[in-house]
Amino acid sequence: MVESRPLQSLDMMVNMGPQHPSTHGVFRMVLWLDGEYIVDVEPHIGYLHRGSEKLCEGELYPQIITLFDRLDYLANFNNEQAYCMAVEKLMSVQVPERVEYVRIILCELNRIASHMLFYGTMGLDAGAMTTVMYGFRERERIQRIFEATSGARMMHNYFRIGGLKEDVPADFRERVAGVLGELERGIEQCDRLLTYNEVYLLRTKGVGVLSGKEALEYGLTGPNLRASGVPYDVRTAEPYSLYDRFQFDVPVGENGDTWDRYGVRMEEMRQSVKIVRQALEQMPDGGPFMAQGVRRIPRPPKGETYFCTENPRGELGIYIVSDGSDKPYRLKVRPPSFVNLQALRAMLRNSYVADAVLVLGSLDIVLGEVDR
């Protein structure tokens, strides 16, 4: 007679990444599974580390702009704006009003372009392919404007400490105004395609829930924080540039789940279109594109400063220490993607392994910014 023994279950360890296509870069998650349930998760970063902050100490202030283009490489203009405004704050430089409007227009268009890539890849993570075609169609409209303005589709190196590299094209206002209507129609088409799709709702509603209290404790910012019901946006909480002149709403979620994180970004694109339209109406027709008295290679006075902006992924903070030379003594970045990843473990525990890809995708990380 065979003696019967109780069945024993063992947690299985699975590596997802660093080459997994759905980890959105060289990012590795070690998953401990009980069947299809995630018991625990350990994120591993650092595969893309380039030492950008240390490199800044050996670069002239204008040269550092190219390094910021390569942090969050989906929000190049937003990165350039944060860095340039941090140095301008250190130097007490007031840039021309027209420059502020141009920067805001380009940054809000960049926000839409970034969210459109998020939209496409979220569809991919859920098993859809058409979303990528829709999202990249709208991105292409914006990329053409970026290329015509800066000469590059990515890594623009267009903003300067005190202004811009050069004035915008003569037809800049008409070109941007012409694309806004197309973007609005494109956003609505994207919304109808995916947002209330029955399969997508089943995959995202109630998945990866994070309360507002937890989101604050983990230091989340940007759409991920607002999806948990916390209406914090740097553009309204601590207005910089000319954002206090515009009327726009701050989208907020209710449940803090994967669907809310997606929905907040969809609504943000509509609000960015509103901001760009107002900026076009208010922008002066002419004026200088550089502040007077700013040297080509500036030497900020001794001191330190911190400046933050609302990037597509949250609060991007720049801390600079100047020793009075033409290179920063110390530069530290507070990257939203890196900070937002802290909540991944709490969001994935007790979820299905199939949900891991969607929950990670809803954080919308960029590994160039995480690892630096």
Image (cartoon, rainbow, N blue to C red):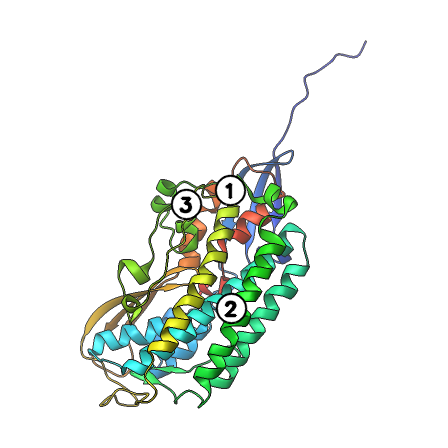
Secondary structure of the residue carrying numbered label 1:
loop
Q: Which residue type carries mark 1?
A: Gly
Image vertical order of residue 265 relative to residue 246, above or below:
above
| Residue 4 location (% of width, % of height) | 73, 13
Question: Is residue 99 visible to the viewer in this orientation of the structure?
Answer: yes
Which residue is identified by label 2?
113
User: Horizontal placement of 189 versus 218: left or right?
Assistant: right
User: Horizontal placement of 84 versus 371: left or right?
Assistant: left
| Residue 8 location (% of width, % of height) | 65, 23
Which residue is identified by label 3?
228
Q: Of residues 325 and 298, which is closer to you in this image?
A: 298
Q: Of residues 78 and 366, which is closer to you in this image?
A: 78
Image vertical order of residue 234 relative to residue 78, above or below:
above
Question: For the C terminus, which image quadrant?
Answer: bottom left
Secondary structure of the residue carrying numbered label 2:
helix
Which residue is identified by label 1?
208
The mark found on residue 237 in the picture is none
Within the image, what quadrant is residue 132 found in? bottom right
Residue that appears at 48% across and 50% down: 261
Q: Earlier in the sequence, mark 2 or mark 1?
A: 2
Determine crowd level at label 3: few under 14, some 14-19, many 20+ residues with C-alpha closer than 10 A.
Answer: many
